[in-house]
């Protein structure tokens, strides 16, 4: 239940909210929302796009916490905007140039590095900001250059929570402050039709590799004994505090430019592995891109002997040892719940990866030119890093759970999608800066949504479209303070379902693992350790808990009402009873007056027996006719199908 939000100027007294809270640990539950979730949602589909911060795509979305909170309609910063600061902490007089140029190689029109300089210290339109110097207007069809999106760099950009060091530590310079007008896109339209979450953060700081791992296990992968490993993986070099503890701050080279205006930062080593004991347990963790131990991998097989073609070269510095931390696939398997990870060009990538290592590759990371297909990204396939998907000892598990996009389309059409579906678009269709544009991925993902809506399973389906991470791009909303893994920068998420709260901007706090919380709650699964750790860290830092996406769904009714009504003299008061916007239908079965002085309060009932859809209300009229002197009181009781009911309104008045 929630308090009525309309004008009640004639009514004095407190307004209360009685609502069901979201569980941080998401253990099996029997509350009304969970029961409704289990009845109404039979298929969860996760579509995982690439590298966009919320403001970068949805900063102009109506009703969202967007760019209008920090700039006016002309793009001039408001007092609420934290200006970008230089590496020494001083305010930058202007944004740096975009190092290497704005547009990716081979793109037309071209915006060069020299044409990108001199922009004001403020967020800007990528389409229009460079036109005065270059004579060119860009669009959502343009592929812009890639930007750093790495674990420590992201934390350095966030700084002390003001997000004011993006221009200082981004390798791309000023482009980090750019945003697009995506209001004509198909995904923007779906967000307006269904539910847009505007307080959704990447689960882990940094890039794609780590956030794909976080999506399935709420964890960072381990690299045992990385400091003595024969493969010699790169270990980040960090600054330390006075007590010798590591800071989330990469050590800069002596030759690194002092000012962001003079060039991108240079670090001693922005490695892929954390130093030992960074997380306090004496272990090494992979936080930047590593390659899978199995094909398809960015590392070729060592040779063609025996089964070697199925594996990546284990001695390569970027080959990650097989992982064993429990993941969401393990939890689903334990309960016998069906699931699959589908990926664009998966079959072609497997064939490409298992060729003789001397054969040039044509699918994995290729073609590498902008918008070229398929440009399959093997580090976007998190289950392929797990020992449970070893291609020899677990060949059957691979065949059952790791599938191609063509299988997804066929399963959707046949009505045979598993209970849980993950889908990863291939490179040219995933919207990643540097090699993909926005339009191609937008059309592809929207087309898939149409196919899912045409599926026999649509009536009980929930689709979550989100992005793995921020792509190195600034956002004005700082993440809540969690644990040493994250959360990182804010990203978009769209919830599409027959049960979505239509046309709603959901302000609930979420992160990537909110998808895991949803799946665990829906299917009654054992929790994952990383979720408990994140919940504990948020509590310790005085932060709100992450939701599990049920707030975006219309599962149970949510009655709104006034808690008290005070009559100073005899008279009539009008009270409103409503159903919160986006809620399931509210059926009011009875309304009555009781209490010591019930006879003093006459109820003219316009609500009993009424069914209210979300966002509608009905009226009650209470007439106070005191039959005695002094304080008089009674209670209105409203019985409905709100699981937190019945609702009660305390009536009071004074008799003369």
Image (spheres, rainbow, N blue to C red):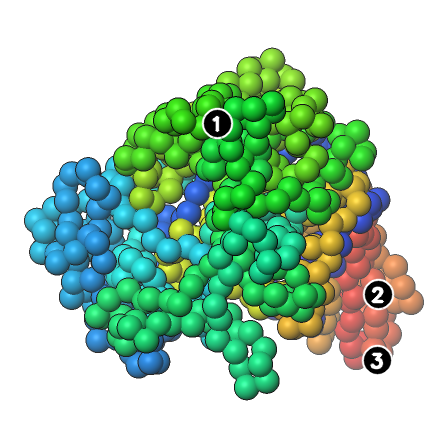
What separation in Å lies between label 3 and label 1 (alpha carbons)? Answer: 86 Å
Residue 256 in the image: state x and y as whole percent. Answer: 30, 71
Q: Which residue is mark 2?
A: 634
| Residue positioned 55% across, 62% down in the render | 274
Q: Earlier in the sequence, mark 1 or mark 2?
A: 1
Residue located farthest toward the bottom when viewing the structure as drawn = 242
User: In the image, is 175 to the left or to the right of 595?
Assistant: left
What separation in Å lies between label 1 and label 2 (alpha carbons)? Answer: 76 Å
Q: Nearer the viewer, residue 222 or 560?
A: 222
Graded by Cα atoms within 10 Å as few (under 14), some (14 to 19) or many (20 or more), the crowding at tag 3 reads: few
Quarter residue 570 falls in: bottom right
Graded by Cα atoms within 10 Å as few (under 14), some (14 to 19) or many (20 or more), the crowding at tag 1 reads: many
Mark 3 touching mark 1, by CB under 8 A? no
Q: Nearer the viewer, residue 306 or 167?
A: 306
Closer to viewer: mark 3 or mark 1:
1
Q: Earlier in the sequence, mark 3 or mark 1?
A: 1
**Label 3 residue SS:** strand
Quadrant in which the C terminus appears? bottom right
Mark 1 touching mark 2, by CB under 8 A? no
User: In the image, is 180 to the left or to the right of 468?
Assistant: left
Residue 144 in the image: state x and y as whole percent. Answer: 26, 46
Closer to viewer: mark 2 or mark 3:
2
User: In the image, is 489 to the left or to the right of 93?
Assistant: right
Closer to viewer: mark 1 or mark 2:
1
**Label 1 residue SS:** helix
Q: Which residue is mark 3?
A: 630
**Label 2 residue SS:** strand
Q: Which residue is mark 1?
A: 353
Residue 403 in the image: state x and y as whole percent. Answer: 57, 24
Graded by Cα atoms within 10 Å as few (under 14), some (14 to 19) or many (20 or more), the crowding at tag 2 reads: some
């Amino acid at each position: 239940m929630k308090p009525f939000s309309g004008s009640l100027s004639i009514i004095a007294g407190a307004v209360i909210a009685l609502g069901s809270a979201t569980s941080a640990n998401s253990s099996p539950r029997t509350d009304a929302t969970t029961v409704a979730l289990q009845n109404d949602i039979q298929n969860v589909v996760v579509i995982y796009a690439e590298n966009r911060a919320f403001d970068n795509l949805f900063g102009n979305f109506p009703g969202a916490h967007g760019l209008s909170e920090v700039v006016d309609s002309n793009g001039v910063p408001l007092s609420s905007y934290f200006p970008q600061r230089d590496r020494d902490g001083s305010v930058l007089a202007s944004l740096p140039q975009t190092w290497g140029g704005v547009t990716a190689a081979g793109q037309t029109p071209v915006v060069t590095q020299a044409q990108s300089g001199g922009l004001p210290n403020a967020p800007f339109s990528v389409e229009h900001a460079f036109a005065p110097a270059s004579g060119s207007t860009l669009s959502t069809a343009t592929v812009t250059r890639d930007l750093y999106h790495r674990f420590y760099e992201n934390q350095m950009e966030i700084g002390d929570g003001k997000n004011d060091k993006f221009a200082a530590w981004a390798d791309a310079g000023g482009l980090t402050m750019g945003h697009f007008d995506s209001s004509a896109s198909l995904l923007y339209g779906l967000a307006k039709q269904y539910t847009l979450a505007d307080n959704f953060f990447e689960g882990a700081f940094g890039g794609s590799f780590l956030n794909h791992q976080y999506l399935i296990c709420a964890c960072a992968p381990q690299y045992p004994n990385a400091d003595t490993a024969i493969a010699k993986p790169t270990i980040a070099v960090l600054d330390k505090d006075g007590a010798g503890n590591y800071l989330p701050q990469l050590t800069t080279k002596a030759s690194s430019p002092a000012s962001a205006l003079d060039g991108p930062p240079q670090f001693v080593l922005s490695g892929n592995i954390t130093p030992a004991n960074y997380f306090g347990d004496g272990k090494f963790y992979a936080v930047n891109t590593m390659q899978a131990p199995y094909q398809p991998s960015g590392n070729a097989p060592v040779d063609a002997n025996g089964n070697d073609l199925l594996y990546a070269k284990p001695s390569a510095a970027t080959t990650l040892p097989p992982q064993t931390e429990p993941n969401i696939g393990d939890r689903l398997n334990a309960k016998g719940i069906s699931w699959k990870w589908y990926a664009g060009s998966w079959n072609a990538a497997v064939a490409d990866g298992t060729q003789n290592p001397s054969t040039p590759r044509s699918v994995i990371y290729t073609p590498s030119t902008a918008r070229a297909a398929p440009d399959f990204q093997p580090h976007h396939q998190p289950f392929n890093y797990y020992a449970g998907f070893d291609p020899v000892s677990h060949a059957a598990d691979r065949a059952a759970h790791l599938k191609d996009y063509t299988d997804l389309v066929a399963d959707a059409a046949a009505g045979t999608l598993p209970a849980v579906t993950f889908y990863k678009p291939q490179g040219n269709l995933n919207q990643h800066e540097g090699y993909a544009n926005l339009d191609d991925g937008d059309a592809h993902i929207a087309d898939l949504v149409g196919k899912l809506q045409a599926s026999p399973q649509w009536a009980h389906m929930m689709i979550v479209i989100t992005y793995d991470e921020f792509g190195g791009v600034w956002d004005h909303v700082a993440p809540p303070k969690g644990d040493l893994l994250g959360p990182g920068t804010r990203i978009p998420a769209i919830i599409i379902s027959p049960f979505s709260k239509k046309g709603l901007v959901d302000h609930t706090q979420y992160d990537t693992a909110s998808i895991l919380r949803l799946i665990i709650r829906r299917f009654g699964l054992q929790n994952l350790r990383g979720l408990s750790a994140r919940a504990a860290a948020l509590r310790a830092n005085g932060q709100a808990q992450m939701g599990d996406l049920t707030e975006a769904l219309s599962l149970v009714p949510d009655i709104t009402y006034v808690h008290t009504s005070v009559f100073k003299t005899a008279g009539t008061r009008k009270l409103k009873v409503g159903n919160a916007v986006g809620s399931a239908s509210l059926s009011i079965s009875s309304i009555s007056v009781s209490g010591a002085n019930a006879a003093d309060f006459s109820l003219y009932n316009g609500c009993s027996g009424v069914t209210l859809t979300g966002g509608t209300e009905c009226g009650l009229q209470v007439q106070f006719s005191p039959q005695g002197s002094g304080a008089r009181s009674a209670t209105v009781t409203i019985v409905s199908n709100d699981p937190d009911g019945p609702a009660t309104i305390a009536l009071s008045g004074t008799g003369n």
